[in-house]
Image (cartoon, rainbow, N blue to C red):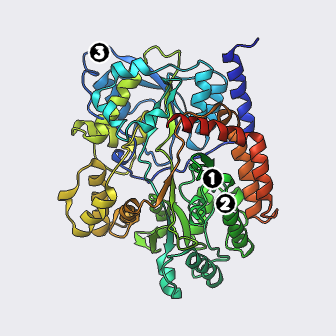
Amino acid sequence: MKSKKAIAIVSLTLALAFTGCSSKTSPEPSQSSGNAKVPTETTGTGNGHDIIEVSTVSPSDPYLKFDEGESFDKNSVYDAYEKDIGVKITNKWVTDISQFKERVKIAIASNDLPDFLPVNATQLKELTEADMIMDLTEIYDQHATEETKKFLTMDGGMQMKTAMIDGKMMGIPSSYNPFNYQFLFVRTDWLKELGLPEPKTMDDFLKIAEAFKAKNPGGTKEAFGIAVSKSPFSIETGVTGLRAFLNGYHAYENIWMEDGNGGLMNSDIQPEMKKALAALQDMFKKGLIDPEFSVKDTEKAAELIYDGSIGMVFGASWTPAQLAKGAVKDGKVVQEWGVFPIPSIDNKPTLNQIGLGVDEYYVISKQAKHPEGVIRLLNQWIVADNHPTEEQKVYGYGKDRVEKGNNYWLLNPLRVGKQFDNNGEILPKAIENKDERILVTADQKTRYARAMQYVEGDTNMWWEYLISGPHGAFSHVPEIQKNKQYLQNKFYGAPTPTMADRQEILTKKRDEIFIKIIMNQVSVDEFDKFVAEWKKLGGDEITKEVNEWYKSLK
């Protein structure tokens, strides 16, 4: 009989046949380490120790710009870790961010892991079953500082629980604030030019899309109503996606929600999804969606925004960083954008779907000689990101310790972020009143400084003002929070057995059918057939397992 490890490795290899390359749109340029996943006070982990070496793998991000003479092989961030905590970082390989996840899959399938690397929830489960990664329970308990332990359990320990498999801590959650919402961004100069109201309802949104298409205020060869790219439902599509559109129809992409009978149901197969798809199909028929969207990645789809062919897009709070490529030309702001809450199809408020604030986990190979080195990196990241000394600013900005837009924070190989922030309450007020006294965190201070640069005439920081300013994306967050206009995934356990085995196949099948429906290649009634197939292909079994987990919590 084959061993459990062998079977799991074969399963991992076969998974490659079902998945293609996936790319995650980068967060905003010039983002401070404070907004990312960053360090807390490190005590007793640095000087005085022999240097230990840990290997990892790294994505090469287009927003990362090296100082002269530096590279992934040798840079001031890696030097700082070696000097401060005695950990030398090496890269087993570096690849473009668009290919990174595929390379990770190949590394797992070939059992060629570095000492530590980021993986998704399904891979965490598979690596555990294949006995390829360490149980971190004791290592973490012994080497994580009290600050680190407190930092990663600010939410009551929910995110940490997602890394537990059979009572063992099998990874470190790559945590972030789950209350990251999506918004509708609209060319407000076009609204004024055409005498259109700001979008408050989905009906308003559709009328604006039709007007932008018909009137073509950008004067381009062909205009469309909304920007869409080829992976519109993925959580990784932070701009040019359609998850927010679905939410406006009270439909949600692959989350587990209450079924009204004390259990949980999957959002992908609910009737509201069919209504949303029918609306998208109608938009496609009217020419409001680029007919080639299904073959365009985010950057390619965004070119229609830059050139003035499209004046609306759904996206995360950092979307203005993407819009800036078309909005600011030769030092002048040539496109005016506004940011609005997701409109609703009826009189019920839109609920912005959110996850748990963790999509990936840092795992440590069973072959790693110095797993404690990885925990030292974690400790130092939390310190340096949240309350850095002047010297520790190197982790965010490089050797000169000055914000210059190089995004050196991306060099930190292990990053965890705060599970909560109050940027929406603090930043718009501070920027409007030019009052920096109310700023608390490093992130707030960096964002405030950038927004003030724009106020003082630096158009290169236009995007930060649209994120953090008095009418920016963050300004809408307090109202959403206050009225609880969000819907959080109710399932936060490790992937169930069937989920680990079948979820990628179900997601691929879903995306194929949904895209065909949108592009009017099949009737919207194909959704009903998809639901039946989803159930047979493992959906019913996953639902059963999820509800067994949910029942165990009560």
Viewport quadrant of the N terminus: top right
The quarter of the picture where residue 409 lies is top left
Where residue 40 sits in the image (x, y, percent)? Answer: 29, 35
The quarter of the picture where residue 499 lies is top right
- Circles 1 and 2: CB distance less than 8 Å? yes
Report which residue position mark 3 lands on. 49
In the image, 467 versus 151, the foreground residue is 151
Q: Amino acid at mark 1?
A: Ser
In the image, 63 versus 484, the foreground residue is 484
In the image, 418 versus 192, the foreground residue is 418
Q: Which numbered marker is on residue 267? A: 1
- Earlier residue among tags 3 and 1: 3
Q: Check disc 2: other Cα within 10 Å, few if <14, some if 14-19, many if 20+.
A: many
Residue that sits furthest to the front in the current view: 261
Report which residue position mark 2 lands on. 273
Q: Amino acid at mark 2?
A: Met
What separation in Å lies between label 2 and label 3 (alpha carbons)? 56 Å
Q: Amino acid at mark 3?
A: His
Residue that sits furthest to the left in the current view: 437
